[in-house]
Image (cartoon, rainbow, N blue to C red):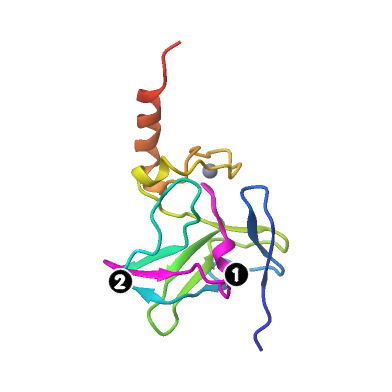
């Protein structure tokens, strides 16, 4: 049986989001993130362009932009409840629950953007620790320094 366990609905974060329509346990597969593999990076990080490309190994991207990949609607959060994991060519990529997720919750993961990419992508995830930009978790302290130094003085 292949009953969908997620649904696409309008999101408070951005556009459409991906929502759980049942409960998930920590570590459970939520939904596949599917698309063809390509050696050409599918999209550039321009302002307001959707980003659906997952680099699965150096120089190889999964293009998740197709309409038959509902997981492309999953938004970034600075405090995500899922992670996007490449599980090999047979299994493909999956959104995996970080912790238990209740029915109706929005599924979010860390887009893992670089500092340069983050400058084009403001974050409105609403998490208490939101960095204000979509940027990989390990880079957030660097972003905070950058924003502090570039902020005008009073
Ligand atoms: Zn955020």
Q: Which mark is residue 39?
A: 2
- Compared with residue 88, is residue 51 higher up or lower down, i.e. above or below? above
| Nearest-to-viewer mark from 2 and 1 | 2
Magenta highlight on residue 149 = no
Measured from the top left, where is residue 105 in percent x and y?
68, 58
Q: Which residues are magenta?
A: 57-80
User: Mark 1 highlights which residue?
Assistant: 70
- Compared with residue 130, is residue 57 higher up or lower down, i.e. above or below? below
Q: Which residue sits furthest top?
A: 154
Residue 127 falls left or right of residue 83? right
Which quadrant does the N terminus fall into?
Answer: bottom right
Residue 110 falls left or right of residue 148? right
In front of the other: 145 or 115: 115
Q: Residue at x 51, y 48 (%)?
A: 48
Q: Secondary structure at mark 1?
A: helix
Mark 1 CB near ligand 1 (8 Å cut) = no
In primary-sequence order, the first of circles 2 and 1 is 2
Measured from the top left, where is residue 109 in percent x and y?
51, 57
Q: Secondary structure at mark 2?
A: loop
Badge 1 crowding class, 10 Å Cα cut-off, few under 14, some 14 to 19, many 20 or more, is: some
- The image quadrant of residue 125 is top right
Magenta highlight on residue 62 = yes
Q: Residue at x 62, y 62 (%)?
A: 100
Q: Which mark is residue 40?
A: none
- The image quadrant of residue 146 is top left
Q: How many marks?
A: 2
Q: How far apart, in angstroms, are the residues tagged by discs 2 and 1?
A: 22 Å
Q: Which residue sits furthest left?
A: 58
Measured from the top left, where is residue 64 in percent x and y?
48, 69
Badge 2 crowding class, 10 Å Cα cut-off, few under 14, some 14 to 19, many 20 or more, is: few
Measured from the top left, where is residue 152 in percent x and y?
41, 17
């Amino acid at each position: 049986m292949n009953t969908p366990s997620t649904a696409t609905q309008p999101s408070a974060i951005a556009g459409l989001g991906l929502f759980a329509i049942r409960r998930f346990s920590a570590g459970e597969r939520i939904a596949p993130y599917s698309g063809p593999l390509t050696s050409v990076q599918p999209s550039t990080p321009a302002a307001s362009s959707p980003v659906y490309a997952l680099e699965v190994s150096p120089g190889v991207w999964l293009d998740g932009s197709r309409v038959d990949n509902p997981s492309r609607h999953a938004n970034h959060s600075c405090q995500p409840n899922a992670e996007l994991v490449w599980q090999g060519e047979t299994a493909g990529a999956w959104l995996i629950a970080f912790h238990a997720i209740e029915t109706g919750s929005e599924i979010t993961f860390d887009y893992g953007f670089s500092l340069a990419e983050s400058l084009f992508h403001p974050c409105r995830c609403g998490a208490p620790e939101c960095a204000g930009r979509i940027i990989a978790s390990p880079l957030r302290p660097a972003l905070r320094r950058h924003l502090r130094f570039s902020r005008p003085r009073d």
